Amino acid sequence: MKRKAISLLLCAAMLVPCVSVQAEGEKKQLKFAVFSENLELEFFEDCIAEYNELQDEVEIVLEQMPQDDYRGAKLATAFASGEGPDIFYSYPGMFLKYASAGTMQSLNDYIDPAVLDDFLEPAIDACTVNGEILALPYELEQVGLYYNKEVLAEAGIEPPTTWAELYDAAAALTTDTRYGYTMETVKGGHQLFEWYPFLWMTGNEVFKDGKLALNEPGVIENFELKRKMFEEGYANINPSRSNTDIGMLCEGETAMQLMGTWGISQIKNRYPEMEEKIGVVPIPVSEGGTPTTVAGGWKLCANANSDYAEEAAKFVVWMFGSEDNSKTARWCTEVKFAYSPRKSVTADHEEFYHEGLKGVFTDNILGTEIPELRLPAEISDTLQDLLQTVYFDTSISVEDAIAIAEEEVNDFLSTYDGAL
């Protein structure tokens, strides 16, 4: 964000452009926008306090905003108007939107090549456009199926391993006060994040020969299965909160919940009484399909259009791209459970990654992941609309909904020359 040492009102009165003015000896103020809460917020507060004490050049100021605004139009509008934060985090679903707009500062000149070698190559590739590293990853999150052990045991049901078993279990576990299965229902990037494994395990991809190609038997089968589960009331059509919150499972709203690795930390920190009652298994697989999950996560970025883009880039690298890997380690092993994009963190915490439910991910799910796609906003929005239609609008066939999405995306791709 462009910082102003004189007020907007004074600028308007003088009818001259506002410029950044720094008094002698005064620290440059950089805004770091977050939507974090609880332990995650505490983590960023601690890091900022440490950095502000370490040097006399800049002061990082933490500013919170609602998650919906962060993921939605409000943050994008702030960047477009030149009032975006100096430091922010992004995920694959919003990455290309800001990369294509020139919002992300290249970090190539700030990160030591020796440290860069400590990162998993796919994690850095996901942050790179035309050879420029535009963000630093600090977590790799995967998805599994969480379930209430006691509820399934009482019903005599084993955790499902196939789509057919998932449907049967959801039907058997649904009561007047509890849904059998919960997944994301809200349009957005997280709904796509949860959908990708069901696509990939059928052997299909989003694109084929440079075009959207979803009119495939496995894709249609999965869409129709989920539509049926919502229509028959076995899937939670009106969840009490985002499906990023394990509370729906722990508080009895659902018997099974599709959820990321971060759910383990939520159970430990908010529902410790449920730690022995919750299990997790790989995502159920299509008939003849390949066990698959998705790997995604947030990345830290500096605003290329900030008056202090260089200072913002230095802070990003200090946080997650310096020789000291302790902040990445704290985030992935204390603040939440996530796999680390830095090899040294994983090596240093091998025992941690095999404890309890974490061990289920490490032993049974890790290694089946495919990186979350980073898509232009126009394509992402069309795919999000497609999921909403096929799940909830029974007035249109799944095949027709796919055809509409394919036409929209392929028309866009015919003139698009940006990164994918």
Image (spheres, helix red, strand yellow):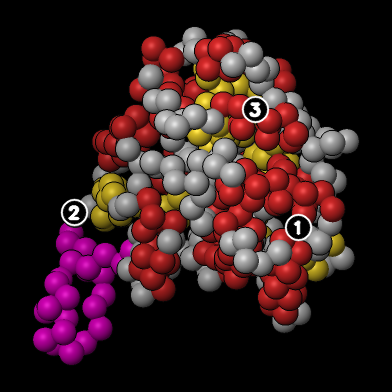
Q: Residue at x 57, y 38 (%)?
A: 234
Q: Position of residue 410 (x, y in %)?
A: 75, 74
Task: Check disc 3 and give the amino acid type.
Answer: Ala
Label 1 vs label 3: CA separation? Answer: 29 Å
Q: Where on the picture, by quarter, is residue 289?
A: top right
- Position of residue 417 relative to residue 252, above or below, is below
User: Between disc 1 and disc 3, whose residue precedes?
Assistant: 3
**Which label belongs to residue 103?**
none
Residue at image mark 3: 169
Q: Residue at x 52, y 12 (%)?
A: 150
Crowding near pointer 2: few (<14 within 10 Å), some, many (20+)?
A: few
Crowding near pointer 3: few (<14 within 10 Å), some, many (20+)?
A: many
Q: Nearer the viewer, residue 88 or 146?
A: 146
Q: Position of residue 370 (x, y in %)?
A: 73, 41
Q: Nearer the viewer, mark 3 or mark 2?
A: 3
Q: Is residue 280 left or right of residue 224?
A: left
Q: Position of residue 407 (x, y in %)?
A: 73, 76
Tell me the magenta residue range: 1-24
Q: Position of residue 382 (x, y in %)?
A: 62, 67
User: Between disc 3 and disc 2, whose residue precedes?
Assistant: 2
Q: Residue at x 41, y 73 (%)?
A: 80
- Position of residue 119 relative to residue 373, above or below, is above
Quick check: can you spot residue 91?
Answer: no
